[in-house]
Image (cartoon, grey):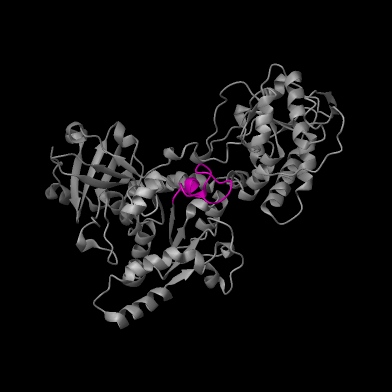
């Protein structure tokens, strides 16, 4: 069925402001204000809570390969706090639950409260983990406090997390009406999402473990605490939370309930990552033809849709319709309302008249990506895809066009995570840019492709062009980004899949007025130890920025490098 008509008479009768682009649409502005409003009201504690969600790569290293000092506890008896199942303390104070932003909704209790025993590596991994267990209670064995004290010295991320955890424990203990015998209420420091209590081990309790487990080892003492708590609290589920895989295996072998700390993972499955695209069903026009409004404005056609399909769309999401014998539709969501959405047709960068620095899109997803990269109203773009999908080439081509031709940005700043695939080759000589040179081979390769497109200028002209391009591209190290502000810059973050959520936040918050940030990466090629697809900083950014009026994401599907690279990506 053909597309609904776009009558020019109707468009001329309507106010231009009513169907303006994303930057001018009142509804889009109103929604952007609504999204910004709650962030302005977030308390200091919730800000720190968000910082805690990012986790720490160095902390994960400790979690996987920790070496505990031998403790002085050699007896089977350990000190344990008298744990009272006081019904008054176990009640949920729902009257104090305040409306949280959409990013941190307060969940209702899903069942009976549990008692979580935290391992030391969880506190070293996320110092804000004390406030992540909602209505459940938290228990800290005394050996955990001993180990926490041993890790607090130094300038590493682990030491900072240990000190932050100690400060949080001190703030809870110093709160008004705090009673360590009954348990410290976790919501006394402003974290209203935490409804449980924090309990410490102070009294003696007998436990028995197999003789094959050394009694002086810290892990085994924590397992003994879990075993003792399970006997004392027969009506309550006691769960050990640890980042140590071997400790969880031992706990299961002893019949103890255990689980990994899941709060640092944005997604459980990498396949659930937001792709940025939506395929319209084959019967879309036959069902929506009577309910679609269409009009033209300039070179673009707009469509207003309703129904259940429209309610699932997000701002800057790309939709497409492809069916044999029917006209195709490629559009982007530019306005979202409770019942309707407005789609705007795209500029076709696959056509030779719309090439960008000699580069034309070769497939549907590349066309979507170039529409985002060339849109001045989109400040943050994430591109995910396998090797050879054209991420770096498109980002550089669009950046050079907007820096040298359009003068929209003053220069291109390129950086990446310096994580090697194999063993480290040692220190590199030279300045900051010279040290980053070996890591920027992708930049040199793509610049060689882009400068070869100018064949009419001759050898001297190409040399002058190369010198001009090089003068507008700065290579920076991520180690010195803290405290900087980029004004009117086009920032490219390559290999973003190797960044932790904390590093990603540090880089994105460097953006000043008029700056565009492009993050590129392949989640299937993570080289950072202890970082997974679910906990990667790129996954974190894509999930948090989806639906933002000035951000967009595209997952590139087809490789265009070579048939060899495409086949290797599929079979290896």
Looking at the rendered structure, the number of numbered marks drawn on it comes to: 0
Residue at (17%, 35%) from the top-left corner? Answer: 289
**Residue 312 placement: quadrant:** top left
Q: Is residue 208 left or right of residue 155?
A: right
In the rendered image, the residue lying farthest to the top is 235
Where is 196 relative to 395, above or below? above
Where is 426 relative to 162, above or below? below
Q: Position of residue 301 (x, y in %)?
A: 20, 49
Give the magenta-colored segment's residue range: 522-541
**The N terminus - image quarter:** top left
Residue at (53%, 51%) from the top-left corner? Answer: 527
Main secondary structure type of the part rendered in magenta: loop
Where is 394 relative to 67, above or below? below
* Residue 150 visible: yes
Residue at (53%, 72%) from the top-left corner? Answer: 434
Foreground: 111 or 158?
Answer: 158
Q: Position of residue 454 (x, y in %)?
A: 27, 73
**Residue 95 placement: quadrant:** top right
Foreground: 515 or 60?
Answer: 60
- Asked if residue 176 is among those painted magenta in the image, a careful observer would answer no
* Residue 408 visible: no
Q: Position of residue 68 (x, y in %)?
A: 77, 43
In the rendered image, the residue lying farthest to the bottom is 460
Q: Position of residue 402 (x, y in %)?
A: 34, 67
């Amino acid at each position: 069925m053909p597309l609904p008509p776009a009558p020019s008479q109707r468009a001329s009768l309507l106010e231009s402001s009513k169907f303006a682009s994303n930057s001018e649409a009142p509804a889009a502005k109103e929604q952007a204000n609504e999204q910004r409003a709650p962030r302005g009201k977030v308390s200091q504690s919730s800000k720190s809570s968000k910082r805690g969600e990012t986790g720490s790569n160095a902390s994960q290293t400790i979690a996987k390969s920790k070496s505990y000092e031998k403790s002085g506890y050699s007896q089977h008896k350990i000190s344990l706090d008298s744990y009272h199942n006081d019904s008054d303390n176990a009640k949920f104070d729902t009257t104090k639950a305040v409306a949280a932003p959409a990013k941190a909704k307060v969940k209702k209790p899903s069942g009976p409260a549990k008692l979580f025993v935290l391992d030391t590596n969880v506190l070293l991994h996320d110092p804000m983990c004390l406030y992540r267990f909602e209505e459940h209670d938290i228990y800290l064995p005394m050996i955990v406090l001993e180990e926490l004290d041993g890790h607090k010295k130094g300038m590493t991320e682990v030491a900072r997390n240990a000190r932050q955890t100690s400060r949080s424990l001190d703030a809870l203990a110093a709160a008004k009406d705090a009673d360590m015998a009954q348990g410290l209420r976790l919501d006394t420091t402003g974290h209203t999402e935490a409804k449980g209590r924090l309990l410490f081990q102070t009294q003696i309790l007998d436990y028995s473990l197999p003789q094959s487990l050394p009694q002086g080892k810290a892990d085994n003492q924590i397992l003994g605490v879990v075993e003792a708590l399970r006997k004392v609290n027969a009506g309550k589920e006691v769960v050990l939370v640890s980042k140590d895989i071997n400790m969880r295996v031992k706990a299961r072998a002893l019949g103890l309930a255990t689980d990994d700390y899941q709060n640092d993972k944005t997604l459980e499955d990498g396949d659930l990552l937001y792709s940025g695209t939506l395929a319209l069903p084959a019967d879309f026009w036959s069902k929506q033809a009577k309910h679609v409004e269409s009009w033209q404005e300039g070179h673009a056609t707009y469509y207003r849709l309703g129904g259940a399909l429209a309610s699932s769309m997000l701002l800057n999401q790309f939709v497409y319709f492809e069916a044999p014998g029917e006209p195709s539709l490629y559009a982007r969501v530019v306005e979202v309302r409770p019942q309707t959405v407005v789609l705007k047709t795209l500029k076709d960068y696959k056509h030779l008249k719309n090439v960008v620095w000699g580069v034309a899109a070769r497939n549907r997803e590349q066309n979507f990506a170039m529409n985002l990269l060339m849109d001045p109203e989109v400040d943050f773009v994430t591109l995910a895809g396998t090797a050879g999908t054209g991420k770096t080439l498109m980002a550089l081509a669009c950046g050079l066009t907007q820096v040298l031709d359009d003068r929209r940005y003053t220069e291109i700043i390129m950086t990446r995570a310096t994580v090697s695939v194999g063993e480290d080759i040692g220190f590199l000589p030279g300045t900051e840019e010279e040290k980053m040179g070996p890591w920027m081979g992708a930049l040199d390769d793509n610049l060689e492709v882009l400068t070869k497109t100018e064949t009419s200028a001759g050898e001297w002209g190409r040399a002058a062009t190369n010198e001009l391009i090089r003068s507008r591209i700065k290579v920076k190290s991520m180690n010195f980004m803290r405290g900087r502000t980029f004004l009117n810059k086009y920032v490219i973050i390559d290999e973003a899949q190797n960044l932790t959520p904390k590093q990603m936040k540090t880089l994105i918050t460097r953006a000043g007025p008029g700056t565009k940030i492009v993050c590129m990466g392949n989640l299937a090629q993570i080289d950072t130890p202890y970082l997974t697809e679910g906990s990667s900083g790129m996954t974190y950014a894509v999930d948090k920025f989806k639906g933002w009026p000035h951000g967009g994401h595209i997952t590139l599907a087809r490789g265009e490098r070579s048939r060899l690279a495409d086949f290797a990506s599929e079979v290896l």
